[in-house]
Amino acid sequence: METTSIENNHKLAYAKQRVLEIKNFYKHLGTFLKLNFLVLLFKIQVFNRFIGDMDLDAKFVYWLEWNIYSIPIIWGVVVAFHALYVYVLKYKDWSVFKPKFLKNWEQERINEILGRNDH
């Protein structure tokens, strides 16, 4: 009876941690969408009017535009990696990549420790 309670506690803790990670991803995605909407709105409304009124070097204007566009591009890549981590990589069983000798060694150590606890 006690082991089922412990297992249920572990499952509950796992579920809470998983929900928290997914929630944090959605917060990150929401912040990304909101702030990049504002950045692009700034580009359309303010930047174009400001640049149109001034006599600036074309290379400088090009540099400014690329800096404005690079924010959503780079941040979008970061959000994509965050999604990949939360939904694919975080809970993947990486033991399939362990060499056989390492798996055998781990199993021998487990058996050794379990054998000591039985005495």
Image: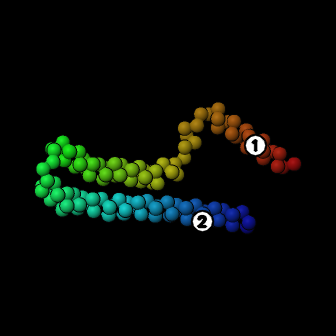
Q: What is the distance, in whole Å, between disc 2 and disc 1 at their CAs?
A: 28 Å
Is label 2 in a helix, a strand or a loop? helix
Along the line of sight, the residue nearer the viewer: 71 or 112? 71
Residue type at mark 2: give it: Leu
In the displayed structure, would residue 118 be above or below residue 50? above
Q: Residue at x 41, y 49 (%)?
A: 81
Along the line of sight, the residue nearer the viewer: 35 or 67? 67
Residue type at mark 1: give it: Asn
- The residue that mark 1 highlights is 111
- Which quarter of the image is occupied by the N terminus? bottom right
Q: Could you say where residue 86 lies in the image, as x and y percent from the top left?
A: 46, 54
Q: Which of the labelled discs sits on residue 12, or is there none?
A: 2
Q: Could you say where residue 4 lies in the image, as x and y percent from the top left?
A: 69, 65
In the rendered structure, the answer to whether residue 89 lies left or right of residue 43 reads right
- Few, some or many residues within 10 Å of mark 1 (<14, 14–19, 20+): few
Give the foreground label among 2 and 1.
2
- Few, some or many residues within 10 Å of mark 2 (<14, 14–19, 20+): few
In the displayed structure, would residue 95 be above or below residue 13? above
- Of pointers 2 and 1, the one earlier in the residue sequence: 2
Along the line of sight, the residue nearer the viewer: 33 or 84? 33
Q: Residue at x 43, y 52 (%)?
A: 82
Q: Are marks 2 and 1 in contact (CB under 8 Å)?
A: no
Q: Could you say where residue 96 lies in the image, as x and y percent from the top left?
A: 55, 40
- In this rendering, does residue 80 appear at all? no
Res 111 → quadrant: top right
- In this rendering, does residue 101 appear at all? yes
Q: Which of the labelled discs sits on residue 1, or is there none?
A: none
Is label 1 in a helix, a strand or a loop? helix
Q: Could you say where residue 60 lies in the image, as x and y percent from the top left?
A: 20, 45
